[in-house]
């Protein structure tokens, strides 16, 4: 029985609404997953997230493995109990963090040897050990270990990373089906499509993964510096061949305009540090565009960030106050703007679902693009 | 009409319960006022404070004057509206910050010239200008500008600072009564007793201030490094002669044991950065003593900081999780422990009020001192 129920596909685009069922509750898609790297979405409590309407969050296997470690989290009763978040959690596989953070990594067909970015200690991940770690974390959705090719890379390099990722996906699934759940709730497993910016590799990898009937399919290895045009092309070719009855997850993307574009191509799930990272820097997302709170224009602006936003920050605080907090270096500023930005992203997805439901997605996206324009000439991050 | 109603004085000690009335609501004493230095109690929202049971907070005139400035706060509708805290606020006079933070300060009978610790810019405070600033801030209780003598200092130095503080108190009150309220709510004004560790100066200053019939009396210039024995002696001699029908406020003090000791001598009001500053370092106060969350003993301790504490942190999170947050450098740890510590201080005062009410204060204090012992041999901070 599939955990995903597709409810409607837009007529003008390939945008879709659906529900992914987990034992920690349903996840309506399209969905944005706030990033809880180290068992916390930075500066926010799980109560904050719940109030913003977050229904699933992401945890980073690489970070949690290094600190506090899967044994401790299992002893705590799993990641949900450890961090006191009782809705669904997706954990990534660590593949991207090994690529972007770890030092002295050495990849063989067996697995990947790397040094911790924290203390230089040596570690070894295999597809099997990464499943085991995620069994200990007890996430509702786990991801297979993959090899993320750098950008730019040659066709041969991309082919090599893709081939290894395919083999690892197979081993991951084999180990997943051969191991016991450690908690009362179900765990799902998603495959990850690699292949850099080469459509033929992506299609090849996607087809290979589809044969294994994963619970969902992620598009990985993007938002690593490639042009936006390449991002679109790759997402397009992946979603074109992925089965309609499984969720599609675009990893690590992105800005509001990226999410809109990907939704139109049939992507269902997103995660990104942008709302929290930018929030900590004092950049807020609004229905009128980005707002740099430190700008002197906000000095005596006694309006909220966004008058129509239901978040705690907008109901209680002015731009002038928030600017003051950033000028004074107060942590509360980071917290309040992170909260607002998460609310913005969650609401953007909620709006997308409503618009798809009512058949007005194309018009709505067009209006949103007036404020958050998609430009092929920029780089994705 | 006095704003303070004394309700009961303990028989075994001089501890008292009372209520200070403001237009933003009543303040039951003894009371602890969390310190909102720069229009925020660090890491916490005003909702957090309200949930902890905070009923009055402190704002720092020196900090708010420098940033964002009294004009902006007045334009925002006062400090309450600026920071979205709708209960009482007490603002200090800046005297202590000029003493402890500002550079190149030069004190004359007219006022004090100093350089900002932020950008070195030159400023001049007079007793009158400080009243004006607090008129703009719109605090419910304002403090007179005082000169805080360093510790140690000679009798002559202490006499000089005290004499000037007395003259400034007179000018402050004169200016206060001669200026209009800028908001709908009433403002009260408290005098501050100086005189370092010399009882005769303290008594002299207290008597001088009492003649002016301030709304309350603060004991200033303590917790600057003097021995605890001196702190007790000075508090004792001040509360002995202060009128019973006015609140007594011990500025900048202190640890739980200091508050208990001062309450027993008849002090009603306290403020201190200890619960928030220590909270940000990972030190928590509990009914069983101080807890250093980073200690390895907490690594797999899945109990809350304090099982009997009603705060959000204790209802939702374990010591193991909090330790992890500090190990990982996550801001959420600072926030959660600050919240808990504020709750602890608020509850300590609530307990003190209950014990005074039921006539069991002495026994309760004795039991509390088993955990938080008062020692005359240490220095106050």
Image (cartoon, coloured by chain):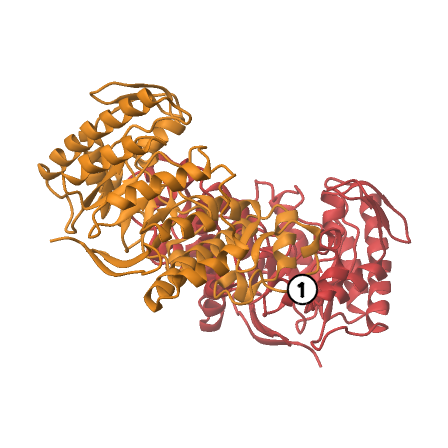
Chain colours: A red, B orange
Q: Residues within 10 Å of mark 1 (few under 14, many from 20)?
A: many
Residue farthest along the bottom direction in this orientation = A1
Residue farthest along the left direction in this orientation = B178
Which residue is pictured at 19% across the width and 40% down the height? B135
Residue farthest along the front direction in this orientation = B12
Which residue is pictured at 41% across the width and 60% down the height? B362
Q: Is residue A181 above or below residue A202?
A: below
Quarter residue B173 falls in: top left
Residue B27 in view in this figure: no
Q: Position of residue B14 (x, y in %)?
A: 32, 54
Quarter residue A377 falls in: top right
Left or right: A60 as drawn, with respect to B127: right
User: Could you say which is closer to the camera, residue A368 or residue B330?
Assistant: B330
User: Could you say which is closer to the camera, residue B339 or residue B72?
Assistant: B339
Which residue is pictured at 76% across the width and 47% down the height? A98
Left or right: B19 as drawn, with respect to B32: left
Q: Position of residue B92 (x, y in %)?
A: 29, 39
Badge 1 sits on which subunit? A
Is disc 1 placed on a helix, strand or loop?
A: helix
Q: Position of residue A357 (x, y in %)?
A: 48, 72
Residue under numbered circle 1: A79
Q: Position of residue A328 (x, y in %)?
A: 41, 36
User: Could you say which is closer to the camera, residue A206 or residue A71?
Assistant: A71
């Amino acid at each position: 029985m599939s955990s995903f129920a597709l409810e409607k596909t837009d007529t003008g685009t390939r945008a879709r609404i659906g529900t992914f069922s987990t034992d920690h509750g349903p996840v309506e898609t399209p969905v944005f997953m706030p990033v809880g790297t180290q068992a916390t979405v930075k500066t926010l409590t799980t109560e904050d997230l719940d109030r913003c309407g977050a229904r699933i969050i992401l945890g980073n296997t690489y970070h949690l493995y290094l600190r506090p470690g899967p044994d401790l989290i299992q002893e705590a009763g799993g990641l949900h109990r450890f961090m006191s978040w009782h809705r669904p959690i997706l954990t990534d596989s660590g593949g991207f963090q090994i690529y972007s953070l770890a030092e002295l990594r050495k990849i063989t067909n067996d697995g990947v040897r790397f040094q911790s970015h924290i203390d230089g200690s040596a570690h070894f991940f295999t597809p099997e050990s990464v499943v085991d770690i995620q069994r200990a974390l007890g996430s509702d959705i786990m991801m297979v270990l993959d090899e993320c090719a750098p950008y730019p890379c040659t066709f041969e390099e991309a082919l090599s990373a893709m081939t290894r990722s395919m083999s690892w996906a197979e081993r991951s699934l084999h180990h997943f089906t051969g191991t016991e759940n450690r908690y009362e709730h179900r765990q799902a497993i998603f495959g990850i499509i690699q292949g850099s910016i080469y459509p033929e590799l992506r299609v090849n990898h996607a087809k290979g993964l589809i044969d294994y009937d994963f619970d969902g399919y992620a598009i990985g290895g993007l938002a690593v510096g490639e042009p936006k045009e390449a991002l679109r092309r790759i997402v397009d070719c992946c979603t074109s061949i992925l089965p309609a009855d499984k969720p599609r997850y675009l990893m690590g993307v992105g800005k509001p305009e990226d999410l809109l574009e990907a939704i139109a191509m049939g992507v269902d799930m997103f995660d990104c540090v942008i709302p929290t990272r930018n929030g900590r820097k004092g950049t807020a997302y609004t229905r009128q565009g980005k707002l740099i709170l430190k700008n002197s224009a906000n000095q005596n602006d006694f309006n909220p960030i966004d008058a129509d936003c239901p978040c705690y920050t907008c109901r209680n605080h002015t731009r002038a106050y928030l600017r003051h907090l950033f000028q004074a270096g107060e942590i509360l500023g980071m917290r309040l703007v992170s909260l607002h930005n998460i609310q913005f992203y969650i609401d953007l997805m909620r709006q997308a679902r409503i618009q798809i439901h009512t058949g007005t997605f194309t018009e709505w996206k067009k209006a949103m693009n007036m404020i958050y324009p998609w430009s092929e000439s920029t780089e994705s991050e």
